[in-house]
């Protein structure tokens, strides 16, 4: 629709009518009108006036109506309107759907674990920059193969042992000195009178099949030994074991250490062995105090106050099977370091 306004009578036909009716006579042509002409003139003027009244007024009203009809729709709004231009809305979702616009959380794939494979009977490899050493230690095997796959925080075992008479191996992670191999920055060998706040954490996973135990091996010696086999005491802390597997020797008592109840077993394996078997079995411990066990062993007379601790080891003794034994995390700290 055009936005032009229609022409009014101010400059159109109405103006032409007024000009025709008001034409002047010439001064040099005086005229005398006869009565008949005068009456005709008056009648004509009346007719013209009637035509003007019946034409101009209705046209003005009509013009107003026409003007209103010709106003573009875009501007025919109320002066107080606050309407805004219409926009296309997104489709309305169900009231039961979440209203949050937060982007969905994506789960990152776990980083690939770099493993170092060790299959030599007594082979080992450092982890965590040498702070710990993972060892295969196939010391009691009957000819079966065994491999450990070491990674930064632990290791896993692949083996298929079949030995009824005792442990086939002790795959483990070591902190300290073991047969001349000392881990980086270790405080061992160290007098047991100066162990300080020595704590350990260990997390494992174990298979549903097979026979095995999950145990610490802590070695004490009368000297600050780094080379060869310790000659003082093998102190074991068993976290878990299958039904057919028991420590060497016999049970000699019970004890509660740091709120946890243990069976105490004592025997001999070339050196005295004391084993603390946890009554409530578990796959993990956190901040376990090592000096608590050493102090109890001294009370029982199997550890001497002037001896040294040479290493803390944590591992598995598989009898049957072995695959599926995993150390997921391991740490030893002294005075928080």
Image: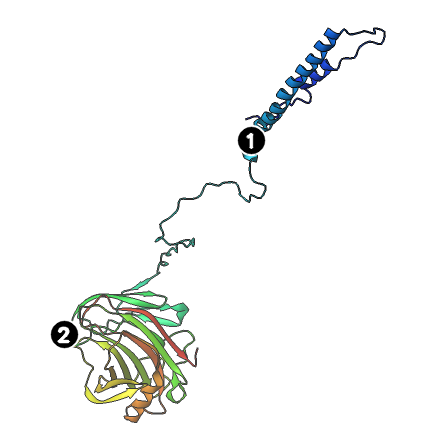
Q: Secondary structure at mark 2?
A: loop
- Which residue extends farthest right? 28
Residues 278 and 250: in front is: 278
Identify the mark at residue 223; answer none if there is no mark: none
Residue 279 x %, y %:
23, 82
Q: Secondary structure at mark 1?
A: loop
Q: Quadrant of the N terminus?
A: top right
Identify the mark at residue 164; answer none if there is no mark: 2
Sequence-wise, the earlier of marks 2 and 1 is 1
Q: Residue at x 18, y 75 (%)?
A: 242
**What is the crowding at mark 2: few (fewer than 14 residues within 10 Å), some, or many (at least 20)?**
few
Residues 5 and 123: in front is: 5
Residue 221 placement, left or right of 81: left
- Residue beneath label 1, please? 72
Kindly tell me whether residue 274 is visible in this rendering: no
Q: Residue at x 31, y 85 (%)?
A: 259
């Amino acid at each position: 629709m055009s936005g032009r306004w229609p022409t009014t009578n101010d400059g159109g036909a109405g103006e032409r009518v007024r000009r025709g009716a008001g034409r002047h006579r010439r001064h040099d042509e005086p005229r005398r009108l006869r009565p008949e002409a005068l009456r005709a003139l008056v009648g004509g003027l009346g007719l013209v006036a009637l035509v003007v009244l019946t034409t101009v007024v209705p046209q003005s009203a009509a013009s107003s109506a026409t003007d209103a009809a010709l106003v573009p729709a875009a501007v025919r709004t109320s002066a107080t309107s606050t309407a805004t231009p219409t926009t296309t809305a997104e489709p309305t979702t169900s009231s039961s759907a979440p209203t949050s616009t937060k982007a969905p959380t994506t789960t990152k794939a776990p980083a690939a674990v770099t493993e170092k494979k060790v299959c030599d009977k007594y082979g080992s490899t450092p982890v965590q920059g040498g702070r710990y050493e993972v060892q295969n230690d196939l010391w009691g095997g009957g000819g079966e193969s065994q491999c450990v796959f070491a990674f930064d925080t632990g290791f896993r075992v692949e083996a298929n042992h079949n030995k009824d008479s005792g442990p086939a191996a002790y795959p483990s992670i070591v902190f300290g000195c073991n047969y001349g191999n000392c881990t980086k920055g270790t405080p061992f060998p160290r007098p047991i009178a100066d162990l300080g706040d020595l704590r350990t954490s260990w997390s494992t996973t174990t298979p549903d099949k097979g026979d095995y135990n999950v145990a610490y091996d802590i070695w004490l010696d009368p000297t600050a030994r780094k080379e060869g086999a310790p000659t003082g005491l093998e102190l074991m802390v068993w976290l878990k074991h299958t039904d057919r597997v028991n420590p060497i020797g016999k049970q000699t008592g019970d004890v509660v250490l740091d709120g946890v109840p243990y069976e105490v077993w004592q025997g001999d394996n070339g050196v005295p062995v004391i084993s603390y078997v946890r009554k409530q079995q578990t796959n993990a411990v956190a901040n376990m105090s090592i000096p608590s066990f050493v102090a109890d062993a001294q009370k029982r007379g199997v550890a001497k106050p002037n001896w040294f601790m040479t290493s803390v080891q944590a591992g598995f003794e598989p009898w049957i099977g072995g695959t599926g034994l995993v150390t997921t995390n391991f740490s030893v700290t002294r005075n928080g370091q």
